[in-house]
């Protein structure tokens, strides 16, 4: 019997592809944010909503199209028999979701979109010719909507966080409410599972979530957007003992070698982090885990405790090796702090990783080279190099609008397939310049003999060497001169 509700993590591009389609996709900037094969994570938000739906008495099925590629027709047919289909909508998958919901029309189920993009831009519900959307966290509001649509309980217009499009033009929204207690909404890891969920240098992973939100407002991030709710920029936490119990249960049930903490900024509350780490130690849990945070929220003492509690990877949004550029993007920590934290991580046997973004306002090519030099000198274990893309309604988007680098309707055109995803290239640099800079950075960082030697020394068990080799092959594949860099190493389905 079909489930009452199907939750979909949509693909960024759906097969099949003609050769013309493949060329267009490879050359399209929006492919840059595709999750490549070694970067696939379970969709944590949908796992939590799956918990809520099952608790509400609904039968529910989850489909992750990035882990199980299928055509839009195959996906639409798999959903037949359900009453409601919920789709996670990001900005980068807006085009594919628009195509998908058009393909799903008239099949007997109500399509509802939720996630970051509807939360910032409720009008996207009407633009996609849908009736309902969810703004903010969906664990309560989406369940209430399903109750209204399936069981006739309550009125949709009374639900906090509801988006209702009338005549595909006017949009009614009701202010969302934050979940009162995160302890009640642990993820249902059985809901969506795939052997493809993995991370470079770590292989297959499980995930956990100890907090939601981030109090900082980096100019390129959702947290700097004027969202009608505070789910992006208000930090909230599970109780430390609840998280430790969730980690313990996950270890017993799935026996993972590694767990990735999916918190936006793990060390906002250092007291809470210490409680979590001490809880792991007191419980005698032996496992490797990793997290991401800001450098100005860490010190060597906290890193040492995290290392003793099993942390083997810490990721940072460094974004640039130039202090003035970091300061302008609201990351006001100096180069001495950067070096101190990288040095401490290596000292405590925690692999330091970071992201570098090329394309900050005012950035020069020399600045970009300085970023590469910094991560080389600091012996960073892994670096994700990116080219700046614009997120709607952020501070950077409005700056790009004033500079004439983007137009107000850029995301509508992207959604309708009339333009590529908006990117940002500073000054007179072009998109081709940015591709070259990105490609050169990947090669310069990863092809150094001393880097290869250090990575071999980082191996904690024999299988690590094979995993490192696989990750390196994927990373270097991104720098292939035969393929546009936007592909990020993902092989398009045949």
Image (cartoon, helix red, strand yellow):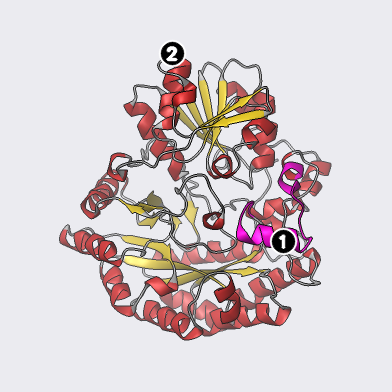
Q: Is residue 24 visible?
A: yes
The disc at residue 400 is 1
Q: Is residue 2 visible?
A: no
Q: Is residue 312 magenta?
A: no
Q: Which residues are magenta?
A: 391-413
Q: Residue furthest left?
A: 282
SS type, badge 1: helix
Residue 1, placed above or below residue 380? above
Give the image quarter of residue 430: bottom right
Q: Residue furthest right?
A: 20
The disc at residue 152 is 2
Q: Does label 1 or label 2 sit earlier along the sequence?
A: 2
Q: Position of residue 417 (x, y in %)?
A: 77, 41
* Of residues 263 and 200, the one drawn nearer to the viewer in this rendering: 263
- Residue occupying image coordinates x 42% and y 72%: 351
- Residue occupying image coordinates x 36% and y 32%: 52
* Of residues 379 and 143, the one drawn nearer to the viewer in this rendering: 143
Dot 2: within a 10 Å radius of its alpha carbon, few (fewer than 14), some, or many (20 or more) residues? Answer: few
């Amino acid at each position: 019997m079909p489930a009452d509700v199907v939750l979909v993590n949509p693909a960024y591009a759906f097969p099949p592809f003609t050769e013309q389609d493949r060329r267009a996709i490879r050359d399209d900037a929006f492919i840059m944010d595709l999750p490549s094969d070694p970067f696939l994570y379970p969709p944590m938000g949908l796992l939590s909503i799956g918990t809520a739906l099952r608790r509400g008495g609904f039968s529910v099925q989850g489909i992750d199209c990035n882990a199980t590629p299928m055509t839009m027709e195959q996906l639409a047919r798999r959903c037949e028999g359900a009453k409601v289909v919920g789709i996670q909508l990001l900005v980068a998958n807006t085009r594919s979701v628009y195509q998908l919901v058009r393909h799903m029309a008239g099949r007997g189920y109500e399509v509802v979109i939720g996630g970051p993009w509807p939360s910032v831009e409720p009008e996207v519900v009407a633009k996609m010719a849908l009736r309902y959307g969810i703004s903010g966290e969906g664990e309560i509001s989406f369940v209430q909507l399903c109750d209204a649509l399936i069981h006739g309980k309550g009125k949709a217009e009374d639900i906090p966080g509801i988006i209702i499009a009338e005549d595909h033009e006017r949009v009614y929204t009701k202010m969302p409410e934050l979940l009162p207690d995160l302890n009640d909404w642990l993820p249902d890891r059985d809901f969506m599972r795939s052997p493809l969920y993995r991370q470079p240098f770590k292989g297959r992973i499980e995930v956990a979530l100890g907090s939601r939100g981030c109090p900082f407002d980096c100019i390129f991030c959702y947290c700097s957007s004027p969202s009608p709710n505070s789910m992006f920029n208000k930090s909230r936490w599970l109780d430390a003992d609840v998280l430790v119990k969730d980690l313990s249960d996950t270890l017993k049930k799935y026996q993972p070698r590694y767990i990735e903490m999916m918190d936006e900024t793990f060390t906002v509350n250092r007291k809470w982090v210490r409680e979590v780490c001490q809880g792991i130690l007191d419980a005698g849990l032996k496992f490797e885990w990793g997290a991401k945070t800001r450098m100005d929220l860490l010190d060597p003492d906290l890193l040492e405790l995290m290392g003793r509690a099993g942390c083997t990877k810490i990721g940072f949004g460094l974004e640039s090796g130039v202090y003035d550029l970091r300061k302008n993007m609201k990351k006001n920590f100096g180069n001495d702090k950067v070096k101190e934290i990288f040095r401490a991580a290596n000292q405590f046997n925690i692999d330091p990783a970071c992201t570098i973004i090329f394309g900050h306002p005012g950035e020069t090519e020399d600045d970009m080279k300085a970023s590469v030099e910094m991560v080389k000198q600091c012996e960073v274990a892994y670096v994700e190099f990116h080219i700046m893309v614009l997120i709607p309604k952020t501070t950077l988007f409005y700056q790009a609008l004033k500079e004439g680098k983007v137009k107000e309707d850029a995301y509508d055109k992207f959604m309708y397939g009339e333009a590529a995803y908006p990117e940002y290239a500073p000054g007179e640099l072009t998109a081709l310049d940015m591709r070259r800079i990105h490609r050169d950075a990947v090669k310069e960082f990863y092809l150094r003999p001393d880097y290869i030697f250090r990575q071999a020394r980082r191996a904690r068990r024999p299988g690590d060497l094979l995993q490192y080799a696989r990750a390196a092959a994927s990373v270097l594949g991104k720098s292939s001169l035969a393929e546009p860099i936007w592909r990020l190493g993902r092989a398009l389905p045949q």
